[in-house]
Image: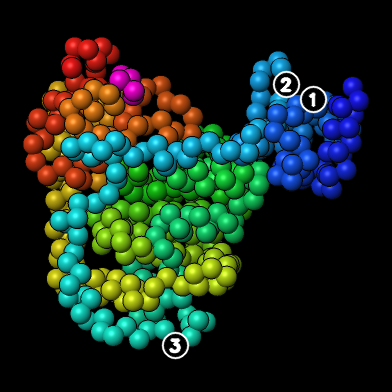
């Protein structure tokens, strides 16, 4: 009883804001400082509510935020305890396949389909593009091209080090501990890792009604991992469903290799839509560039925070990207890649469906394959020298069926043979019959 009273008093002294967010933040600070050591049993929700003179619902919401952030753990009737400070393994780290003969787990584009950088690098010249550390973060000519390509008129545009860097920085300025954030289910695992790190409460899109989210993160076309693309009517309907103050973050990661026409909620809500234009899939992962455009209050906050870190993305690389986006030869190469990826998707999908396997790959470079058992499918494919990404890390809440993600963009031929192996792995439950 004495220890419980001490913990209650400790928490009460730390709490200045008695909202659920304030309580969660205060407890989180106590955990980080070591005042609530790992393994400590927390007082009950009702005891904390009574001590703070708030409703049990408020404390329960705070506890849920701390659970999502990994700061505390529940043990059923045994109670709630402070978690170990060691973070769980990142979802992103679970995607990489073993070193096998054929790696279809990576989600990277085919290097042979990327535009040749040789001439672009020559045309950049000596690269005297930076005169001050406080120069504008985007080359003016590149910004002009980006604005012409944007799906809606953005108030501000900046360039960062890839789409994942963009997501990280937007979360940093727009999401606070305990905020509710809506995402697609399934969705990109690193996004879930970033939101977990921020302490956000992640809500699947299917539970949007009543969630009152601070932000929603979507991929309007060539969604990773399913390849799904939203129609113009889908976009309009979602824009109408969102609460007035929700920030919309769109990740157009496939960019110019997507076959679908670009769509954006920014055509309906330009004042609160942040659009990310990725170039890794279309022009090369090693360019490490993505453009971010939308409301000035968010874009300028992102650019200002970068002044205390990298400052800007390499203007040399920006000059290369500008050349690639305007060179007729590079534009033609990207167009060829787009058609080739479409051929690969269609070929493997047709081969799988003829073998009664269920898969989705409407656009982009990935294929989402339904399997009877994820782990057994991974083991079976590994026995054939093939690695794919497990589906579980993509899920916000578990699906009724298991899946794996196959990087179909890396499959240039042999569709029938690969489909036979994939279909067999998808439906079999006894691996011994295949080994």
Q: Which residue is mark 2?
A: 79
Task: Give how far apart the Cα atoms at labels 3 and 1 are.
Answer: 59 Å
Asked if labels 2 and 1 touch by Cβ distance under 8 angstroms, the answer is yes
Check contact, mark 2 vs mark 3: CB within 8 A: no
- Out of 317 and 87, give the one closest to the viewer: 87
Magenta region, mostly helix, strand or loop? helix
Question: Counting other residues with Cα less than 10 Å from the Cα at mark 1, is it few (<14), some (14-19), or many (20 or more)?
Answer: some
Is 46 above or below relative to 319? above
In this view, the residue in front, 157 or 136, is 136
Q: Is residue 80 above or below residue 132?
A: above
Determine the image quadrant of residue 163. bottom left
Please determine whether, in this image, residue 332 is positioned above or below residue 423: below
Going by the image, does 211 lie left or right of 339?
A: right
Specify whether residue 155 is painted magenta: no
Chain part drawn in magenta: 372-376
Crowd band around label 2 with a 10 angstrom C-alpha radius: few (<14), some (14–19), many (20+)? few
Circle 2 SS class: loop
The disc at residue 131 is 3
Identify the disc placed on residue 44. Answer: 1
Q: Does 435 appear above or below 229?
A: above
Q: For numbered disc 3, what is the local secondary structure?
A: loop
First-in-chain label (2 vs 3): 2
- The front one of 135 and 153 is 135
Name which residue lies at 32% across and 83% down: 127
Image location (x, y in percent) of residue 323: 25, 75
Could you say where residue 107 lies in the image, as x and y percent from the top left? 29, 45
Q: Residue 376: horizontal and vertical position, in percent?
A: 30, 20
Look at the image and tell me whether residue 324 can be seen: yes
Q: Earlier in the sequence, mark 3 or mark 1?
A: 1
Residue at position x 42%, y 25% from top? 399
């Amino acid at each position: 009883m004495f220890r419980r009273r001490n913990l209650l008093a400790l928490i009460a002294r730390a709490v200045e804001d008695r909202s659920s967010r304030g309580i969660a933040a205060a407890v989180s600070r106590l955990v980080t400082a070591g005042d609530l050591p790992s393994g400590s049993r927390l007082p009950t929700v009702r005891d904390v509510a009574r001590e703070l003179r708030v409703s049990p619902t408020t404390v329960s919401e705070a506890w849920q935020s701390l659970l999502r952030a990994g700061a505390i753990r529940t043990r059923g009737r045994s109670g709630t305890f402070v978690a170990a400070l060691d973070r769980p393994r990142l979802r992103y780290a679970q995607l990489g396949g073993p070193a096998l003969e054929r790696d279809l787990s990576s989600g990277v584009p085919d290097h042979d389909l990327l535009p040749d950088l040789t001439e672009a690098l020559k045309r950049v010249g000596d690269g005297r593009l930076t005169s001050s550390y406080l120069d504008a973060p985007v080359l003016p000519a590149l910004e002009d091209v980006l604005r012409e390509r944007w799906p809606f008129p953005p108030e501000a545009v900046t360039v960062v080090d890839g789409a994942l860097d963009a997501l990280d920085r937007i979360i940093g300025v727009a999401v606070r501990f305990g905020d509710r954030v809506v995402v697609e289910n399934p969705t990109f695992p690193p996004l879930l890792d970033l939101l977990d790190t921020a302490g956000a409460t992640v809500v699947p899109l299917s539970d949007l009604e009543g969630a009152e989210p601070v932000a929603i993160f979507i991929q309007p076309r060539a969604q990773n991992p399913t390849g799904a693309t939203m129609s113009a009517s889908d976009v309009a309907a979602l824009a109408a469903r969102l609460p007035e103050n929700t920030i919309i973050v769109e990740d157009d990661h496939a960019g110019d290799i997507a076959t679908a026409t670009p769509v954006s909620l920014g055509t309906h809500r330009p004042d609160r839509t942040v659009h990310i234009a990725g170039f890794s899939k279309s022009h090369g992962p090693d360019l490490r560039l993505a453009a971010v455009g939308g409301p000035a209050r968010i874009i300028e906050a992102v650019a200002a925070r970068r002044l205390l870190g990298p400052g800007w993305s390499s203007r040399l690389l920006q000059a290369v990207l500008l050349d690639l986006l305007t060179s007729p030869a590079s534009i033609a190469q990207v167009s060829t890649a787009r058609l080739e990826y479409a051929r690969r998707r269609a070929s493997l999908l047709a081969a799988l469906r003829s073998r009664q396997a269920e898969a989705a790959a409407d656009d982009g470079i990935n294929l989402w394959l339904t399997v009877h058992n994820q782990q057994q499918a991974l083991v079976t494919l590994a026995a054939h020298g093939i690695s794919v990404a497990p589906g579980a890390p993509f899920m916000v809440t578990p699906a009724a069926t298991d899946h794996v993600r196959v990087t179909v963009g890396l499959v240039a031929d042999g569709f029938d043979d690969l489909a036979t192996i994939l279909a067999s792995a998808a439906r079999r439950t006894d691996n011994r019959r295949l080994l």
